[in-house]
Amino acid sequence: MHIIVVGMNYRTAPVEIREKFAVPESDWQEALRQLRQTKSVLECVMVSTCNRTELYVVVDRLHMCGHFIRSFMETWFGISRQQFTPYLYIYEDDQAVEHLFRVSCGLDSMVIGETQILGQIRNSFLFAQNEGVTGTWLNTVFKQAITLAKRAHAETSINENAVSVSYAAVELGKRIFGSFQGKKVLILGAGKMSELTVKHLYANGAAEVMVANRTLSRAEELAKQFDGRAGTLDEAEQMLVEADIVISSTGSKEYVLTADDVKRAMSRRKSRSLFFIDIAVPRDLDPAISDVSNVFLYDIDDLQGIVESNLARRR
């Protein structure tokens, strides 16, 4: 038997490709079921984050396993292998295990040393284990990877000065404005990433934070922690009229805002510029928004410069 990893990440594929291969947690169960039923696959774990989608599988033979995995991807994602194969990497056996260890420790992340990926690896593994699609091989290597990552963060300086994606988004905002003093920020989404973003914003002196979420109660819960204002995503267009910058991370499968939404809001802003930072994968914001006059749109790949600056300071 052999362990294989097939995947793509922020190094091999831009966000417009990665978003097509993101698997929301609501689809994990069915995706794992179909992956496990793929010919030659004996065990499987799937990891899907904003910066990577990876399939970890145990196969009974190496010959043709890559073909079978690509067939699964064609069927599940509805995209021909000719379109996605150039963005893939495949590691086998020891290289696959080493890759998992590097990913778990944050050494393969856009933000070197970040700890969020460890939680994502753990959640992905436990979900697959609970679904009964892992076995002795993957149970062993994933438990080892999680233990190793915990030790690496506890016993080394790997995460010293590490930043999160949400922190990098706020840093990009600071580069745009110089300071958040007197600025109103609209956060789209109220999940963990949005919560971290709000914390960084207030730490950097944001005047007011507005939170818009599909579920109003969750938006109110987050906004209340920071004396902010809450609304639904249906109210986001109205909130745009007041905002100086918008940071979005909702987990929606469809665009939360379109170019037409933004055009209507901009017509009421008297030509004031508006900045958007989309840290969601799939993207929350229609790329055509960048064509609207006086609007500036950044996505998660644009944060790479912030991260590289942070890395340079650590050297």
Image (tube, helix red, strand yellow):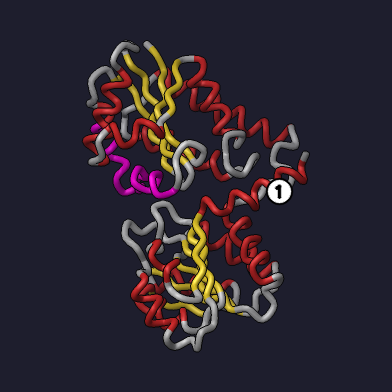
Residue 269 coordinates in the image, percent (x, y): 49, 86
Name the residue at 30% across, 26% down.
Answer: 69
Assess whether residue 25 is covered by the magenta stretch. Answer: yes
Name the residue at 63% across, 50% down.
Answer: 305
Assess whether residue 78 is covered by the magenta stretch. Answer: no
Task: Determine which residue is flagged by label 1.
Answer: 310
Residue 63 coordinates in the image, percent (x, y): 31, 11
Compare residues 204 and 136 and report the one nearer the observer: 204
- Rendered view: 300 above or below 144: below
Name the residue at 49% across, 65% down.
Answer: 297
Badge 1 element: helix
Left or right placement of residue 303 versus residue 67 in this view: right
- Rendered view: 196 above or below 42: below
Left or right placement of residue 253 versus residue 226 in this view: left
| Three-letter amino acid code of the residue under disc 1 | Asn
Prevalent SS, magenta region: helix
Left or right placement of residue 228 versus residue 93 in this view: right
* Quadrant assignment, res 115: top right
Compare residues 34 and 309 and report the one nearer the observer: 309
* Quadrant assignment, res 128: top left
What quarter of the picture does the C terminus occupy?
top right
State which region is magenta: 15-34
Name the residue at 38% across, 34% down.
Answer: 46
